[in-house]
Image (cartoon, rainbow, N blue to C red):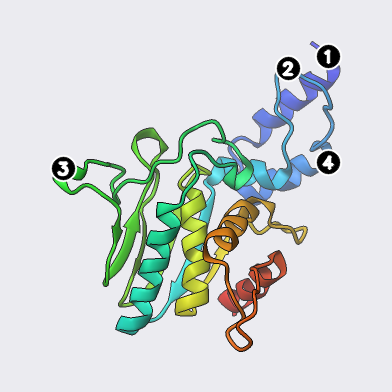
Amino acid sequence: MSAAKAQVQVEVRRVSSFKSDTICSQLKNFNNFVTKSTDFRIISTNQLKHTTMGYTHYFKGTKSTDAKFKEFSNACKKLHDNLPEKTDTAGGYHKDDKLIIGDGRGHLHESTGDVPIFDNRMVCFNGVGELAHETFRIEKKGTNDFCKTARKPYDLLVVACLIAAWQILNYRFSSDGFNSDGTCEDLVPAMQYYNEVMQPKNKITGLPEPITEAMLWEQRKKYRD
């Protein structure tokens, strides 16, 4: 075993029981120390932190009108109906797995009604089976919640629906996909998917106005206010 591998193994064991912020502190000095190794997948400190602790989105909003929530629910249904077969969302950890959406419990059986919900009172869904994680739910009465997707394929629809909630219901969201270096590449696949399907327009001019990374960061500031 090379000295480089030995050092990394020692450091990983040393920080395995620390809190996430301690992990970042311990790892930043040798984050790219190993450049070639069959034993390690070199990822950013931020990715390691949120892969270990659970990749999560946080969102909040107040009670919606009937008309607005119907518009939001219909948008989420449209996003659902146009999903790709696979996705590289949230870092591409499951890019080879099929993207299938089930009910809030992670089941999908149309004959028994175990299907995602897009109605006039809530939007609720999950992945399916082993590719399910925490339920994503936004209700007409208002929601202040979080959803840990663990970077599984249904994350694409979760983030796209959060963008819809921001655009239509004036929700705000934060996410582990916002990095301390000012990037949010893990959110970009969902942002691009939202732009492709919904083709957002400026509310005043009516001209095309795709969602950008800068716009995502700006709304996040209001979430944190």
Of residue 4 and residue 92, the one placed in the foreground of this image is 92
Residue at the outermost left position: 112
Q: Residues within 10 Å of mark 3 (few under 14, many from 20)?
A: few
3D distance between C-alphas at marks 4 and 3: 54 Å
Q: Is residue 128 above or below residue 75?
A: above
Q: Amino acid at mark 3?
A: Ser
Q: Position of residue 196 (x, y in %)?
A: 58, 59
Q: Is residue 132 visible?
A: yes
Q: Amino acid at mark 1?
A: Ser
Q: Is residue 44 left or right of residue 135?
A: right
Q: Is residue 62 left or right of residue 14?
A: left
Q: Is residue 28 above or below residue 14?
A: below
Q: Position of residue 193 (x, y in %)?
A: 57, 55
3D distance between C-alphas at marks 4 and 2: 21 Å
Say whether marks 4 and 2 touch (CB < 8 Å): no
Which residue corresponds to mark 3?
111
Quadrant housing residue 6: top right
Residue pictured at 61% horizontal, 75% vertical: 219
Mark 4 and mark 2 lie on one chain; the one further toward the N terminus is: 4
Which residue corresponds to mark 4?
29
Which residue corresponds to mark 2?
38
Instruction: Name the quarter where the C terminus is drawn.
Output: bottom right
3D distance between C-alphas at marks 1 and 2: 12 Å
Residue pictured at 62% horizontal, 57% vertical: 192
Which residue corresponds to mark 1?
2
